[in-house]
Image (cartoon, rainbow, N blue to C red):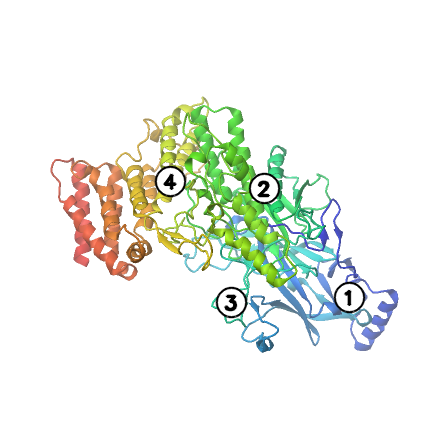
Amino acid sequence: MLTHRILTAFLIGSAPVVAGCARPSASQAPSPKQAAAGADTAKKNGTKTIAEATESSRKIEGLFTVYQDTTDGSTQLAIAKDQVGKEFIYFMHTVNGVLEARTFRGAFRRNNVFTIRKTFDKIEFVTVNTSYYFDRNNALHRAADANISPAVLAVEKIVAQDSAASVYLIKADDLFLKEALAQIKPSPNPNVKPGTRFTLGNLSKDKTKVVSIKSYPLNTDVVVEYVYENTAPMVRGSQAVTDPRYVSIAVQHSFIEMPENEYHPRFDDARVGYFTTQVTDLTSTSATPYRDLIDRWHLEKKIPGAALSEPVEPIVWWIENTTPVEFRDAIREGVLRWNRAFEKAGFQNAIQVKVQPDDADWDAGDIRYNVLRWTSSPVPPFGGYGPNFVNPRTGQVLGADIMLEWIYVTNRVRYERLYETAGLSLEREPLLDDVFTCSAGHELHLSTLFGLQALKAFGADEVEMKAVVNQGLISLVLHEVGHTLGLSHNMRASQMLAPEAMHNTAITSQQGLIGSVMDYENINLAKRGETQGEYYTTTPGPYDLWAVEYGYSEALTDPAAEQRRLEAILARSTEPALAFGNDADDMRAAGRAIDPRVMINDMSSDAIGYMEDRVQIVRDVMADLREKYASPGTSYHELRTGYLILTGQHGNAAVVMSRYIGGVYLDRAVVGQPGATQPFAPVPAAEQRRAMRALRTYLFAPDAFDAPEGVYNHLQLQRRGFGHFGTTEDPKIHARALFFQKLVLDHLLHPVVLARLSDTRLYGNEYTLAEMMGELTDAIFAADRRGNVNTFRQNAQLEYTNRLAAVLSTEGKKKYDYLAQSMALHQLKEVERIAARRTGVNEETRAHRAHLAHVIDQALDAD
């Protein structure tokens, strides 16, 4: 998710022009008379003039004038006297990278404010801390710099000056060719064993070089190729790394004029989801002294006060010429549909879309353009990515891009070798510490693959298959554009409609399938023979319209009246269609967050029932799997991919259902807000029991992972050279089933969840810890308590027993409260009684139960 990169002072069109500030650039070339005067002064001081110091250089004029020597490529930077002491915006993004180095093309990275200081004969570049606010009417503002450390990035000696023109010249190679402005090479992860992860070597002074310099009146851009050398790499990386000894990363450093306009910040509120620039008021006495600035574009009405007006300057998006022609209409539609939301905020045609000509004289790295870009990466880092960069002083969005990956429309899994985990992305590992990444594209891709599998099994025609891809692409673009507008995820939105409305196109075409396109939606798929509605949401939902109204509607001139106006908008947050919960609230990872409605890949107001239907569809499609992928002359690779996708949906469904157990519904309404309930409301006991029953049936039952005859022995990866060298190619069927069971047990037996089951009894929870663990033990053991245990169940039973034992271990006692320990011991005793039964069963079951008894004996003896 990238945001557009247009400066407030830029008008974006086929030929960008500068608007706003009319003064000439401070770094303009001096007049002949000024230059002569400067030369005389320089001679008196014994220093060179700028003309003398740059006589062998080409000159690139703009916000900052840059000189590059035509012989050795070295650079020098001119600093005007009136630029000293001013604030500028610094922005860095990756022009080209490699995923192993934790960066990729289009990654937006550093974005901060810096100032230039002159100290005697030196020029300093200093990053300014913008995280704190001091009220100018409070005497404390005079101590605003106390105990807040600025960052001195670089210090360069003045090598020449023209006093009459008030310009200083410094050498710039150390500024750009070293990691002075921003860190490029990632810091080592202390939790990762050295030698087990790909690492960059040392920065090469000889190979690192400036590859492009472009300077405009309001910004100066320098592209540098950083080359890292590691003569003896221990991890070589993928084939995308040509030679791990020499790795190149190209980044663009942009210096941007601080905008001077009529933009007024708007502040964050917990009831609506925007990306923010966090600011703390250190002169406030409030318990929450926050002045967090939401990220948003600077839109002004051509007709101030009009109910509906075009903006003075619209947000213009360019479809990069790398974009496959057949997808351009869907991409354009996905962008333009946001105009529906802006109409709610009083703007007509707020967003425009153009196509980059094949002979354009600009590229996507030009920050004056907001570009929808398309790539096909060897190791795709995302399906879609859409960040923005802002003015940290105000939160004004200055520019954005959106990156889309070709894998979204391909029939392949992102990581083929991750057999046991393909189809789930429940944990999030950031690609970069300072880069926001989004998994919506990956989730949508896997969801689309499942939909295509199902439609193929159901006998759908080519029109329906194309509709899935087209609607999914519109949904993906809507999501990523939403990020560029400043909107964060809303993982609560997928529960807007009742199940019976999910395929009613009269409803969904108007308000969408989900309340917000900022959720990670699952494909809306009907069972075989039932009426099929829209597969994906293709319009901004009610929440999106409301959020854009809050962020972008025209402000009143009276501050008190404006505050009342915004509060009236926010007061609607209790309406069900406007429900909100972001990544901090979502429950995709075990033990994190509490509200099961804030979850990825769930759908409808009855997520448990919807996921039960999803498993039934998976089983239906699985029955036809071999028949649908039996084309003569093809390998079984596509069959294997189909199996991965189907079982991935099965696992996702189980994870979604599990979150209702021990869950708590959240309400972030403020005190006295109409429609508010209470901040914490435990999930009703009936829903928790229902979720446990579903898990018993679809995850732990003896037949939960049954597959049609002939599927398992055809799950063959297509051979490619020595692709499976060092491992074996046979399908790891039991490991995959156990992986899904582990994901659910991770949540159900998490120390936080077990403690919550006890805590919530104090404010309404009627599903006790004892009942939950008793039912879990029953789900895993009851069906074969008096008979033979199949191999899938043996794995699940031992996994559960080992986890109970772990609760009672020395390490477990540090994590689990006494109540959880007591219940773990009680359940362990119950399993011990089951394990004691070894008559009337086969040898395999006897061995298994002896193993259970051994685990229990060790746990109790250790205790």
Q: Amino acid at mark 1?
A: Ala
What is the spatial separation of the Cα atoms under label 3 and label 2, in whole angstroms?
43 Å
Outermost residue toward the left in this view: 839
7 or 179, nearer to the observer? 7
Q: Amino acid at mark 4?
A: Ala
Asked whether residue 507 is in view, the answer is yes
Earlier sequence position, callout 2 versus callout 4: 2
Q: Amino acid at mark 3?
A: Pro
Which of the two discs, 3 and 1, sits closer to the camera? 3
Label of residue 375 in the image: 2
What is the spatial separation of the Cα atoms under label 4 and label 1, in whole angstroms?
68 Å
**Residue on which disc 1 sits:** 53
User: In the rendered view of the protein, which quadrant contains the C terminus?
Assistant: bottom left
Which residue is at 25% across, 36% downward?
A: 702
Crowding around mark 4 (Cα neighbors within 10 Å: few <14, some 14 to 19, many 20+) is: many
What is the spatial separation of the Cα atoms under label 3 and label 1, in whole angstroms?
51 Å
What is the spatial separation of the Cα atoms under label 2 and label 4, in whole angstroms?
31 Å
What is the spatial separation of the Cα atoms under label 1 and label 2, in whole angstroms?
42 Å
**Residue on which disc 3 sits:** 289
Earlier sequence position, callout 4 versus callout 1: 1
Crowding around mark 2 (Cα neighbors within 10 Å: few <14, some 14 to 19, many 20+) is: some
Which residue is at 38% across, 32% downward?
A: 618
Which of the two discs, 1 and 2, sits closer to the camera? 2
Label of residue 653 in the image: 4
Tell me if residue 326 comes above or below residue 28 in the rendering: above
Label of residue 687 in the image: none
* Secondary structure under the numbered disc 2 in the rendered image: strand
Q: Are marks 2 and 4 in contact (CB under 8 Å)?
A: no
